[in-house]
Amino acid sequence: MDPRVDRAITSGSLSRLVTSLKGLPAEAYAEAAKALYADDARHPRPTADGVRSLASDRSATARRFAAHLLIHAHDASPKASLKLLSRLIKDEDREVYDAATTAAGRLLRRDFAGVVEHLASWRKAPSPAVRKAMLVAVSRASTYRHPEWAEPLLKLVGGLLEDTDPLVRKALGAATLGGALLKQYPRDAFEYLMQWSTSNNPQVLWNVAMAFSAPAAADIAKKSIIILRKLALDEREYVWRAVSLAMAKLGAKCADVVETELARWLDHEQRAASAREALKRLNPDDR
């Protein structure tokens, strides 16, 4: 720990601690927050009013530190910490926003039942950054060690499947659905993706296709192709291009299975465009 931070912690002064943290990396904030709540600490823990004051401070450093403190203050006052988290997640300072997003993921793991319900309200937030933060929190909290979390998390992100904002799209399909949920909960995620693939909404279908562009899809390649084969029939370019990307990503790990499938698609009028695009991505030197 930085000596200045260590001395500030020992002094028991939050304002001095905030000053010492300025310019330091996120790890320093996390270490300082953890030290303040350590069981063997020789100083009083920050009060609820102290954390709230930091969260409202003009200084971005103070607000950023408040987000780290919420991770530890949550157990004592869950409602108050979630209220402050919802304030900090709207912060225009990028580092404060990132710290709040990290806190959301940590709190979701710490108090799943209480936090997952709170995060559901973020799906309707006017700010796409807040909606994206919910997805990032889900990604960070997902773990195969808690299979009972699979369905609540899938239902939670399902509320954003039709969201067309670029920030949300980038965080949802390949990242949250594929990179986190399909990886950690392959059986449950596949069932939901199969269900969502029956939608007629192009954004929903795009997200489904993009989920199979994640590395985790390679573990269930043949099952993934079943859904992608159906989506390739969609005449909307937005959808079939997502399918072609997913097939190319899948082909990079399961070449034989994918290239055999794409060869069949070339002879199918509705799937041919997607197949040609996927093959171009797989074999760029053949262009």
Image (cartoon, rainbow, N blue to C red):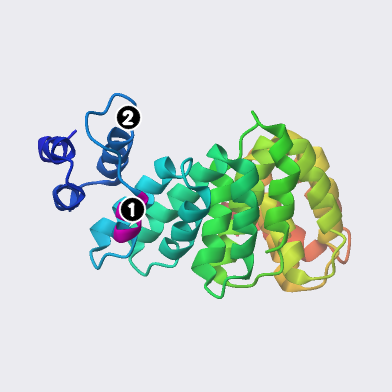
- Residue 202 in percent (x, y) is at 76, 70
The residue singled out by tag 2 in the image is 38
- Residue 54 in percent (x, y) is at 29, 58
Question: What secondary structure is marked by label 2?
Answer: loop
Q: Residue at x 74, y 53 (%)?
A: 155
Check residue 52 for magenta coloring.
yes
Q: Nearer the viewer, residue 276 or 15?
A: 15
Q: Residue at x 13, y 39 (%)?
A: 11
> What's the amino acid at mark 1?
Val
The residue singled out by tag 1 in the image is 51
Task: Give the residue at the far top of this rendering.
Answer: 40
Q: Residue at x 70, y 71 (%)?
A: 238
Quarter in which the C terminus is drawn: bottom right
Label at residue 103: none
Residue 174's place in the image compared with 106, above or below, is: below
Part of the protein shown in magenta: 48-53
Magenta: main secondary structure: helix
Question: What secondary structure is marked by label 1?
Answer: helix
- Residue 218 in percent (x, y) is at 69, 38
- Taking 67 as reference, is 147 left or right? right
Q: Nearer the viewer, residue 276 or 161?
A: 161
Mark 1–mark 2 distance (CA, rounded to whole Å): 16 Å
Chain-order first, disc 1 or disc 2: 2
* Crowd rating for badge 1 (residues with CA inside 10 Å; few <14, some 14–19, many 20+): many
